[in-house]
Amino acid sequence: MEIEIHVIHYLVISTVMMFCGVYGFFTRKNLLALLISVELMLNATNINFAVFNRYLFPGQLEGHFFSLFGIAIAAAETAVAIAIIINVYRNVKHILTDDITDLKG
Amino acid sequence: MQAEISLAVILIIILLADLILKAPHHKALQTLTCTLMVVQLILNLVPVNQELFGGMYNSTTMASVVKTILTAGTLLVFMQSGRWLSGEDTRHKAGEFYLLTLSTLLGMYFMVSAGSFILFYVGLELASIPMVCLIAFDKYRHHSAEAGAKFILSSMFSSALMLYGLSLVYGTCGTTYFADLPQALTGTPLQLMAMVFFFAGLGFKLSLVPFHMWTPDAYQGAPTPVSGYLSVISKGAAAFALMNILLKVFTPMTEEWGLMLSVTIVLTITIANVFAILQQDLKRFMAYSSISQAGYILLAVLAGSEQGMTALVYYIVVYIVANLAVFGVIGAVEQQTNGRVDREAYNGLYQTNPKLSFVMTLALFSLAGIPPFAGFFSKFFVFASAFHTGYWLVVFLALVNTIISLYYYLLIVKAMYITPNEHPVPAFRSSALMRTSLVVCLIGIVLLGICSGVYQWIDKF
């Protein structure tokens, strides 16, 4: 039996990924888990771009390029975020969101 | 493209100077950077209209004017940061501060003159990633690290939301070029959702309610010159980019985003005002003030006309001088008192430092919109443009809020002039560059409003 994969299958996956990321971002307490959730969201958008390009506009390259830029920039962001999380750890000895609540009001 | 190229050259020169000059070189670097920024200003004084790379880069004359304004604002920030950078912890990385700041400026250049969502996104990220490093610049101060962590996570979250919106725009239209998009956008529900996602993403950058949670923390934790930079330059660039895109790209959905903006503006201004009254920490207070100012700037976006565009750019100019004057004074007092930024530190400041108090007072008056200072006129033009398009209810609510804002701005003035204090901050003299920057801000606050030529000059483009 052969299953044909349509654009809709990819979109379902990317949407689920996106909103799992959003859910994780709001519920997790660990800074690294927050980072992972955001990465999930960014990757969902990359899938979207690539799939739209491949299935709907096969003659173009814009979507593919957008995902390439997205991947590169997400990597840069992650590098900076991890550096900052390490710095937080050095200062507070914890990376739980409950422990970095000095600034509020 | 000239502005971008010359700024990139300046970046490289400062990078090399940072490597070559012998430590401690923070003073020499500051002089060099300020000189180069003046050169950059002079080189790009004449606005140009240019389209390159098949429409990917599209710098209108108005974008060119905005770039010049942003450069001038950055120069003011550099002039104010000397004292902070000469501290023990920061002295050796003064070069990094200038490099990172200029990178964000370069990103904003690309952001305001993008002709395609790809370049826009790259510019936006170039403007926000180095910004995170700037916020977490005081490595050994725990607040700085905390603010950095909060900023990077919310910034990534917002760009992911924005990208999701952009991917839906691409999926429904098949192009990312601003020039082709209005024909392809028809206002289907999916496209509406894409627009809302995009707006939410930029709303984070502009710190609009309900996306404003990171702002007070980031401003309070960041070093004072960085808070100043964050509050004016990056906000101004984001506001201009938002207006540009809403007008150029989402033209077929004007009605929908008009409604969305109206609600956001009223919420932003009101909630920010209520919270600003409660603040004791001056940097945090300025954060809430800048959130409400962002609401006023958005009134010009709401107008969605040529008049609105001029009002927006004029508002940015006035906002830059007034806000940087306040942050300059906060920074000067903070350095003098070992990091005190609470309002009580300002009690009786007038007795010992009358000039600083005077600058601060005029700047606060301008922010509150009291005539004859520039802030009154900028608010007036913004209100007029939104009223002209027919949003009189939003304008009325914003007007009521202006009166509330007067109260909390005057609280600081009261602390400086009236509240008695046995031990006010002793009289001190700031560095020459700092004083020059404050004088420039002061001249701007007083003259920009009175000289109507400025508004007309901007209106020409």
Image (cartoon, coloured by chain):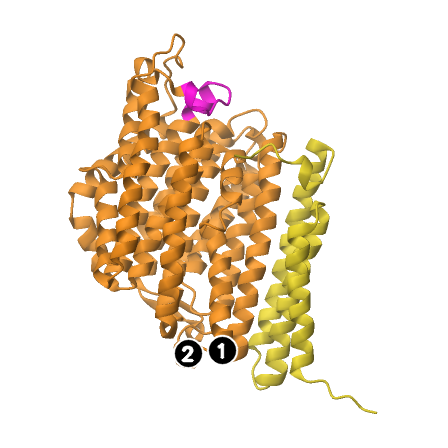
Chain colours: A yellow, B orange
Is there CB contact under 8 Å for labels 1 and 2? yes
Residue B338 part of the magenta segment: yes
Residue under pointer 1: B175
Q: Amino acid at mark 1?
A: Thr
Residue range (magenta): B332-345
Say what secondary structure mark 2 lies in.
loop
Image mark 1: chain: B
Left or right: residue B59 compared with residue B340: left
**Residue A17 in sight in this render:** yes
* Label 1 environment density (alpha carbons within 10 Å; few <14, some 14–19, many ≥20): many
Q: Amino acid at mark 2?
A: Asp
Which labelled disc corresponds to residue B180? Answer: 2
B385 above or below B118?
above
Left or right: residue A33 compared with residue B386: right
The image shows residue A86 at horizontal and vertical percentages of: 71, 40
Residue found at x 66% / y 70%? A14
